[in-house]
Image (cartoon, grey):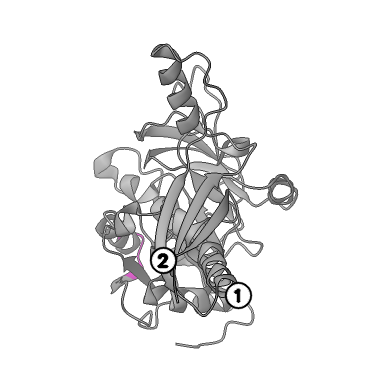
Amino acid sequence: MSFRVHVRVMPRGGLLDPQGQAVEHALSALGFAEAAGVRVGRAIELEVAAGSRPEAEARVRQMCDKLLANPVTEDYLLEVEEA
Amino acid sequence: MLKVAVVRFPGSNCDMDSLRAVERAGAAAVMVWHRDTTLQGADAVILPGGFSYGDYLRSGAIARFSPIMQAVQRHAADGGPVLGICNGFQILCEAHLLPGALMRNAGLTFVSKPVDVIVERTDTVFTSAYERGARLRLPVAHGDGRFVAADDTLRMLEAEGRVVLRYEPSSESSPYQPNPNGSANHIAGIANATGTVVGIMPHPERVADALLGAPDGLGFFTSLAAWQPRDTPHKVPSR
């Protein structure tokens, strides 16, 4: 089976996110003063061949722990759908 | 004569400067390619600055899995010296040879200018030629230089005296903006517990020649050239 996996990598809460701050300032300057708590992360999509959905998720978690996210500074979320 | 391997990744751009600084200090230097699998019998390794693999994903994240890095990991595990400069420091953190990570500068801009740093630890392979507390004026040139680590890791680094270089607060005699990137505790460089693996953001290889002004950075390379492999116990020739 083939699965499409969406990985969302975000800077860990509590760490300074200067990109998020800069975007928030820019939104405010554009008149969107209601925007708050902006954080900037990274989205990665991939297709994975696996026997089952849990197997696909487990493999992508390994990919995240090894390469796609930095365990010191980032957290990640996975969304798995059948391709 | 001590032999130093300088690793060239696709995107390295301080590799020749590092090689020449090593030679200027009186040691032999060889360039090794990122796809090589041995260090050609070198006694020490330098991971130079630059933008390996275009800094894709995260600075150093992909270089860390280069074939040569397996040899560097073994070399470091055997007690062999490794110096990571700028991108090299980022690679050492990604490879977990040093703790923490280097994130986007707090000011978001690429910073390229001289900064003043204090040498806080001199019992490393790369800083033994300096006096403790010496102030060096070294160039920085990076976009991802903000050192970040978990609170307990920072406490451990401070308690064990593993901060090698720290950005100096600005003063009349030192007008440069302190801490160019927002690093935790103003950290500019750290070492492993034994002082054999060192990572620094500033570029000593760019100021290792009197022709380019005060050669404040040469000490990193003369320290290394004076290092005796037998100083480190348990070194197993595995190459």
Q: Secondary structure at mark 2?
A: loop
Q: Mark 2, chain letter?
A: A
Asked where in the image residue B214 lies, by quadrant, the reply is: top left
* Residue B27, magenta (yes or no): yes
Q: Is residue B3 above or below residue B90?
A: below
Q: Position of residue A38 (x, y in %)?
A: 52, 29
Q: Is residue A23 above or below residue B151?
A: above
Q: Is residue B139 left or right of residue A12?
A: left
Front in this rendered view, residue A58 or A73: A58
Q: In which quadrant will I find the C terminus of chain B?
A: bottom left
- State the residue at coordinates (60%, 75%): B232
Neighbor class of circle 2 (other Cα within 10 Å; few <14, some 14-19, many 20+) is few
Front in this rendered view, residue B178 or A52: A52
- State the residue at coordinates (31%, 46%): B206
Q: Is residue B232 above or below residue B138?
A: below
In the picture as drawn, the residue positioned furthest to the front comes out as A82
Amino acid under label 2? Ala
- State the residue at coordinates (50%, 27%): B178
Q: Mark 2 — residue?
A: A83
- State the residue at coordinates (58%, 48%): A73
> Disc 2 vs disc 1: Cβ atoms closer than 8 Å?
no
Q: Mark 1, chain letter?
A: B
Q: In which quadrant will I find the N terminus of chain B?
A: bottom left
Q: Which segment did they paint magenta?
A: B24-28
Q: Secondary structure at mark 1?
A: loop
**Visible residue check, residue B86:** yes
Viewer-nearest of discs 2 and 1: 2
* Residue B181, magenta (yes or no): no
Asked where in the image residue A26 lies, by quadrant, the reply is: top left
Q: Mark 1 — residue?
A: B232
Q: Position of residue B21 (x, y in %)?
A: 32, 57
Neighbor class of circle 1 (other Cα within 10 Å; few <14, some 14-19, many 20+) is some
